[in-house]
Amino acid sequence: MTRAPRDGRRGRRRWGSAAAFAVCLPVGVALAAGSPIPALTPVPSAPSAPPPPMRILRVTSSDPACQPNCPEWISAEGIISRGTASALAKALDGLGGRRLPILISSYGGSVRDALDMGRLIRARRLAVAVARTLVANCPQRARECPDARGRAMVDGAVCASACPFVLAAGVARLVGPAPRVGVHQITTVFEETEGADRPRRTVKVYEQDWVDRTVAAYLASAGVGEPVMEFLRRTPAASIRWLSLDEIKASRLASEALDPAAPISTEGGGGLAGFAFGDLAKPDVMTATAPDRGGLGAVLTLTYRRGGGALELALARAGERATKFEVGFAPAPGASLASVEARERTARPLLPRDRFCARRGDGPLVVTAAGPASPPLAFDLAGAADVEALAAEACP
């Protein structure tokens, strides 16, 4: 808490910019896709059990079906408070440069920390999704959870008050079909004392100038437009303005839809399950293609989801797709194809992310389709623009 002297008065004024966060908001009915969103909801002033401060965890999917290449993500749940941005920075520094998606559920808290979190996320080009994480191997309120295992879910996730500033920072911003994303006025909290013999009092002040200069500029730089700022200015701090899905899309506060059945997919290579709005049949994944270097007309397609543990591979030759093949890396550039036939290979079209990242510059990727008459095919991954873009997301 920053302290500043107050001229002409005894004692000191302590101040910190914070959004009055919405806590334990009741919702009368479950919201379905396309159902009306309540426009204005009072914020209870005295919750019986305040939510804990935000916990930042690196989580690996607990689904046994994804072993040994399970997807990972960063879970951020709870009230944003002083030090939350530093905790996020520490967690991101421990990733070795890997860009894991952020799954956030929060009723808000400190605006300044939320903005600092957003700047970290934007600088590292991370995706943000409004979703919860059910951690299987640690208590909900445990501050630390080494080797956290869990599953992601959309139900019950909320992003209100200061939380949308974190959501806005994502290079991809994802919400479920009936999102609970809300805003209201920002208050600055002053704690005043009149001397040792006088009681302390707390004063909350809405500062329009600070909102316009700082928050509006921040949202504009993230590409988020109206009606977010309009609702933020007009909605009293004691209430919350829940944004409809159409308003979220129109303002670009979200760029993609999150699969409500499995926000983190554990099928195939796994990873963040985002889709273009209005078309859940087309997953938003990163793909790259590489032609075989022997000129035989074969094309290898690599697919990766954010946070996934493996890359999915598809091999096509003469218009036909191979359903089963083996894959390995040549030991060095220019090595004969025969030398890799006994080396590391997999019988299914998945390439572990860590193996791809460690070996992609070592030599060509060698693929052998099932069948005695199928010769090995070599694919050069280094230098291909779309492969490099995919690697920038998958690899540290």
Image: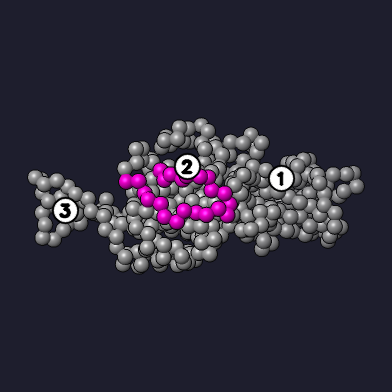
The label on residue 12 is: 3
Circle 3: element type: strand
Q: Which stretch did the figure color magenta?
A: 24-45
Q: CA distance from mark 3 to mark 2?
A: 37 Å
Q: Residue furthest left?
A: 197
The label on residue 57 is: 2
Where residue 375 appears, as percent x and y from the top left, is 86, 50
Q: Is residue 354 visible?
A: no
Secondary structure character of the magenta stretch overall: loop
Amino acid type, mark 2 = Leu
Q: Mark 3 packing: few (<14 Cα in 10 Å), some, or many (20+)?
A: some
Give the mark count: 3
In the figure, is residue 184 to the left or right of 15? right
Counting residues from the N terminus, which is met first, the one under dot 1 or under dot 2? 2
- Residue visible at 81% across and 54% down in the picture: 316
Q: Which residue is mark 1?
A: 350
Where residue 15 appears, as percent x and y from the top left, is 25, 54
The label on residue 187 is: none
Q: Mark 2 packing: few (<14 Cα in 10 Å), some, or many (20+)?
A: many
Amino acid type, mark 3 = Arg
Counting residues from the N terminus, which is met first, the one under dot 3 or under dot 1? 3
Counting residues from the N terminus, which is met first, the one under dot 3 or under dot 2? 3
Q: CA distance from mark 3 to mark 1?
A: 62 Å
In the figure, is residue 129 to the left or right of 25? right
Of badges 1 and 2, nearer the viewer stands 2
Circle 1: element type: strand
- Residue visible at 64% across and 34% down in the picture: 64
* Residue 32 in magenta stretch: yes
Q: Mark 1 packing: few (<14 Cα in 10 Å), some, or many (20+)?
A: many
Where residue 145 appears, as percent x and y from the top left, is 46, 36
In the figure, is residue 191 to the left or right of 10? right
